[in-house]
Image (cartoon, rainbow, N blue to C red):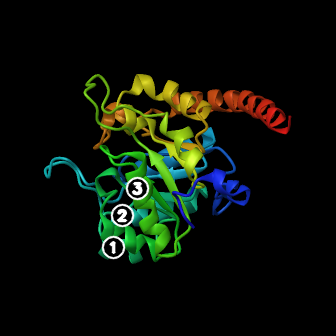
Amino acid sequence: MNALRLTSLNSDDNRQTVITVDNVKIGEDFVVIAGPCSVESEEQTIKTAQKVKEAGANMLRGGAFKPRTSPYDFQGLGLKGLKILEKAKKETGLPVVTEVTDPRDVSWVCEYADVLQIGTRNMQNFSLLKEVGKVNKPALLKRGMYSTLKEWLNCAEYILAEGNPNVILCERGIRTFETYTRNTLDLSIVPSVKEVSHLPVIVDPSHGTGRLSVIEPMSLAAMAAGADGIMVEVHHNPCEALCDKDQAMPPGMFAVLMKKLWVLRSCMDEINQINGNKTLE
């Protein structure tokens, strides 16, 4: 498989890759991945997992390993965090997405995670990409903060070339001169990816903006842009969050977002039907 191949080259290549994780089909359904930035305790993780499940989320996110800008910030619970995520899955049934940061950790993180996330700082960690390419678990590859579309897709190629066909791309904002938001969420990348790649692409508006007030409109905009899903940070008590508390959604706000997404989804289905009719003409 080739992430860079142009869909216009062959009509047989127009089919988008669909990645199945338990009963979730990424690339076919609009998927919502939600949960805390980091796993802080069993109570925090399971409470948050239950809340996002109630609101309609499809998968649970949570970091057991947290590469941080400062070495003095909370770095995650490691193996203990992975075991908590495993328990949260048993409690809620939500498949788990968690980050792996070291090639040496890939095989045993697979014992606990359903999807291996590769963060923006590791997008070009080629040793890590190759190891993730050797395992039978989907990889969620975040775009590097300074990366072009071609560079991002070439990193996906490292995973695909090792034999793992299940790569999910994730736009999470890029660095520009703008300082009001944490990053600049590049939603133009979504239709751009779909023009040149068969891989599903989701959007992370939490890291993409870093501002709670704009996560909802950017989530809706991501769906309108054609994204296959979003990944949102939710914490049952954001004031107590040890990581990224300013962008953590409280459960009530997340539940409202989910209702708006499903209303927009029905509108998008009608728009897609119109597009389909134009194609037939």
Q: From the top left corner, tell me how far across and down residue 131 is, in percent.
A: 38, 74
Q: Where, by quadrant of the figure, is residue 226 drawn?
A: top right
Is there CB contact under 8 Å for labels 2 and 1? yes
Residue 105 is marked as 1
Tell me residue 21's x, y (percent). 61, 62
* Gap between marks 3 and 1 measured at Cα: 22 Å
Residue kind at label 2, given as amino acid type: Val
Tag shown at residue 42? 3
Of callouts 2 and 3, the N-terminal one: 3
- Tag 3, which secondary structure? helix
Q: Position of residue 203 (x, y in %)?
A: 49, 41
73 sits to left or right of 44? left
271 versus 80 height, above or below:
above
**Number of dots carrying numbers:** 3
Residue ID for mark 2: 100
Q: Is residue 233 above or below residue 261?
A: below
